[in-house]
Each structure stands twice: as structure tokens, then as C-alpha cells.
Amino acid sequence: MDYIKAFIVGGIICLIGQILVDKTKLTSGRILVIFVSLGCILGGLGLYKNIVDFGGAGATVPLTGFGYVLSEGVKEEVDKIGFLGIFTGGLKASAGGISVAVFFAFLSALLFNPKSKG
Amino acid sequence: MEENNKSKQEYSKMVDMVSPNSSLVMNCIKAFVVGGLICVAGEAMNKSFSNYNFTKDEVSLLVNVVLIGATALLTGLGLFSKLGKFSGAGTFVPITGFANSMVSPAIEFKKEGWVFGMAAKMFTVAGPVIVYGLVTSMVVGFIYFVAEKVM
């Protein structure tokens, strides 16, 4: 059942992205920016947590989940250290994901060469 | 000038009429299925990593490690772009898309140098994502701070 929920929630979030691609002139990069900010806002309002509780990885794997991590992290840090947590919380919570992506991007650049198009 | 605008409008109308609506439906189905399957893979990893003594945060980081690592490998082998063409938002909305947006230019632009080629171009898309994500998180944090600690 959890798998079906993850499939449906993740699928719907991607479907929204696809509609934005086909029906607007937004590029994929802009859509990712919108999704992260949206996830962060919904997380801040306490709404995205419900989606995560229902959809599991269906809600955390899409980039809206990254925004949700940022909002949860900043709230946690504000609880812990107060005002300065506003500045440190987001990056602290997302440090692992960003560093892992940098690591793999760097490693790929070392290992692979560009494929000729076509 | 006016005539030019008019013909442009007519042209875009014609394009709308000619381009089949079914392609939108088909694209949406592909995005839904592929995106959904990537999330199912994430859920399966969530469950299997949870069987070991990891905290919740560690589990989600490990899931990211596998998904980003797999994306890097597929991108390096030139397979990710084929999958991306097929599934559209199905692969770029999940964390795989964020990873691909870093890995792909890192490989592509190393010929322009390792500092301002590879390292700089890596953040063409990821940079804005991080900037707007962080700024939004600061706004959220500020509002949360005012609501919880001041009021």
C-alpha cells in the first residue's frame, strides 16, 4: 500500500511538472526553482508534512521534498538556537544532499567524457 | 507592425490546432509513470534502510546517495538523456533531475577548465535552486521565529 501511495503522490507531482513544461514556456530549471520554493512554503505552512506522511518517498524524492527539508531544518534550528537559526537551518538540513550531489558531479567529470550528440 | 502581430497570433493558433492534444496526455502519462516509479524505488530504499540502525535523517540521506549516484552513472554513460527525453518531468522533477543538472554540465564543460568550466557550470541550475530554496527557507524561518518566539 505504501508503494502505491508513493507511486501516486510522486506521479502527480511529476505530472504537474509536465503540464508546466507543455503548457507554459517555463524551462525545466525554472520549474525546479519553483518546486523547491513551493515545497519550502508548503513545509513552512505545515501542509507538506501531511503529504509526506501520506506519500512517503512519493513526497520526499521530488524536488518539492528538498524544499520541505529546508523548511523543517530552519524551524528546527530556530527552536534550538533562536534567531540565528533562520540563517543556518536550511543549509544545515540540506548539507548532505548538496554535498553528495557535488561529490558525484565531480567524480563523474573525472571518470566520464562527453558523449557525442546523436 | 500590427499585421505582423496578427499573423503571429494566427500562427500560434495554427500551431495549437495542428499539434495534437494527445501528445500532452501521452507526455503526462509518461511523466506520471516514470516519476512514480522513481518514488517507488525511493520508498523501497526507505524501507530497507530502515531495517538497519539508521536514524530517519540518515535513511533519507542514504536514499539520496543511491538516487544521485545512479543518476551520475546513467548520465555519464549517456543513458539519462534518453530516459529524460522519454519521460520529461518524470525524471527532472525528482532529485534525479537536480543531480543530472549538476552531473551533466560537469562532464560537458570540463574541456573549458576544471575551475570555471566544470566547477562553475555545475551550478547553472543547482545554484538558482539552492539560492531560491535558501531564501525561501529564511523567510519561513523568520516568520516562524516571529510567530513562536516573539508573539
Image (cartoon, coloured by chain):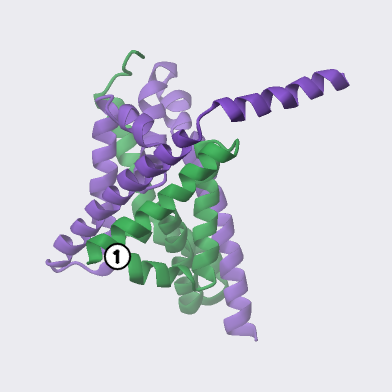
Chain colours: A green, B purple
Report which quarter residue B143 is drawn in: bottom right
Report which quarter residue A109 is drawn in: top left
Please identify the residue farthest to the left as the structure is shown. B52
Q: Residue at x 33, y 58 (%)?
A: A8
Quarter of the image with the C terminus of chain A is: top left
Across and down, in percent, residue A42 comes to 52, 66
Q: Is residue B80 visible?
A: yes
Q: Secondary structure at mark 1?
A: helix
Across and down, in percent, residue A95 comes to 39, 55
Q: Residue at x 28, y 57 (%)?
A: B61
Q: Is residue A60 visible?
A: no
Question: To which chain does the residue with label 1 belong?
Answer: B
Image position of B12 (left or right of B61):
right
Report which quarter residue A68 is drawn in: bottom left
- Residue flagged by tag 1: what amino acid is it? Asp
Residues packed near mark 1 inside 10 Å, few (<14), some (14 to 19) or many (20 plus): few
Count up the numbered dots: 1
Across and down, in percent, residue B99 comes to 36, 40
Q: Which residue is mark 1?
A: B57
Decide: is B35 above or below A51: above
Across and down, in percent, residue B141 comes to 56, 69
Nearer to the camera, B4 or A116 = B4
Decide: is B71 above or below B60: above
Nearer to the camera, B150 or A37 = A37
Q: Residue at x 41, y 48 (%)?
A: A14
Quarter of the image with the N terminus of chain A is: bottom left
